[in-house]
Amino acid sequence: MSTCEMADVKSAEVTLAPKARAGVINPMYDCQPAGAQFAGIGVKDCIPLVHGGQGCSMFVRLLFAQHFKENFSIASTSLHEDSAVFGGKKRIEEGVMVLAKRYPELRVIPLITTCSTEIIGDDIEGTLRLCDRALKAELPDREIHLVPVHTPSFKGSQVTGYAECVKSLIKTLAKKGEPTGKLNVLTGWVNPGDITLLKHYFAEMDVAATILMDTEDFDSPMLPDKSIKTYGRTTVEDLRDTANAVGTLALARYEGAAAGEFLRDTHQVPHHPVSTPYGIKNTDDMLRKIQEITGKEIPESLVHERGIALDALADLAHMFFANKKVAIYGHPDLVLGLAQFCMEVELEPVLLLIGDDQGSKYKKDPRIAELKRTAHFDIDIVHNADLWELEQRIKDGLKLDLILGHSKGRYIAIDAKIPMVRVGFPTFDRAGLYRKPTIGYRGAMELAESIANAMFTHMEYTREREWILNTW
């Protein structure tokens, strides 16, 4: 590193601050119940019951259908005006019983609260105890687990809602028994393609793992018998045995660590948080942690896979990516992981937008300290951010070469004529992205090539078809 570069490193800043405005314009996240519903549909024989107005489930189901191009079973207690006065207890009791009788295979009902029912103050736990007694009386041969999930919409986001539902499911179902020798894996909010890749890693290392939540079948097959296979693969038994695992590997600090900490504190299951495996280093760290926990060696096949990814990244990094300015928005684990990946390939993540009110937690995130230590340029991190923040900064003169984020920000990129790569949730204006991994070695290669192709296409349209190396 030159003296000039060292001076740049010393002068670089990573700032973390809330946005200047109190209100939210063009939010980048949905609410807590949306995240809880996503966690709930990751469980087999489970139908989440959303305790609130019809729209609290209908619009979330629409988001899932847009992203995954599949339909999912989510129920609603469909509260109306009278419930605001008299409470929604009867709607819960009716909803639970209707689901139990209509779906003979049903084993889990997470009851997900919303802003209205949290404000009303319905006694969720007490009502579920009454429902449990009614189920045992009317359906004595069935075992249906009722899980209270408190997700008021007026705080947090779909990120905290997902984390709350995963923790509530484990808290309700985990039961101490015989050791399983398996590793709990809390994936966080990732795509089916990421789950498939994770399973590939565990298979190559010969490690028995329980994926929480296993959404691989959200990439659903179309079969000759017309059967529908779109459901989560995580079973009641999987959740029950989380208390008997050799350890918990939490791949998402904000979407999985709370459940891992609960298992550690309640059932003495060792908790191993790692950075979400975006990019080469984070994937290396994850595989080494699996090796440390299980004693299994990292096989030559994964070393080869890593080498293929390194070669692909080397073909692109210095020639095309060096010093290109990037803005990233979305989930905190995604945004910070992608920022680390950008640094690996010589992109400069100058603006990171995180869309909820958990700012005090972000200040303690070790990945932010790592970015500050390694960056030779200023990085601005804004929490409780919205997409208006991105739009205004561009209008105020922020120069960007690339935007990374989900489909809700596409109009900003179009209006500003900045190339954009879709990543995160929801992505609905590009085909098949839920099928492609973003994490791991393969995900790093896929993402880098998507970035390069977006830049190449942008250059062709803005440079009159002239091919200019390292200039866009």
Image: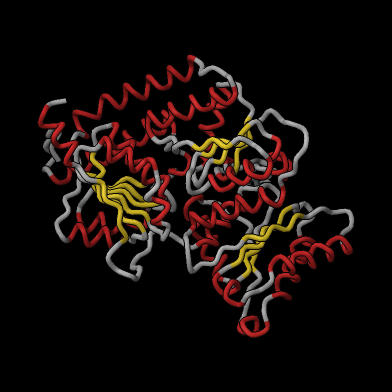
Q: Residue at x 51, y 51 (%)?
A: 69
Tell how many labels: 0
Q: Residue at x 57, y 55 (%)?
A: 164
Residue 225 location (% of width, % of height):
69, 43
Residue 437 at least partly seen:
no
Question: What x and y, as percent, mark residue 166?
Answer: 60, 50
Q: Is residue 209 left or right of residue 16?
A: right
Say whether residue 458 is visible.
Answer: yes
Closer-to-camera residue (310/267) = 267
**Quick one: quadrant of the N terminus?**
top left
- Quadrant housing the C terminus: top left
Outermost residue to the top: 300
Report the front residue among 258 and 307: 258
Residue 131 position, x and y percent, is 79, 66
Relative to 79, say whether 329 is above or below.
above
Could you tell me which residue is drawn at 43 percent across and 30 percent down? 283
- Image coordinates of residue 185 in percent, x first then y, are 58, 37
Give the camera-side residue of 400 and 216: 400
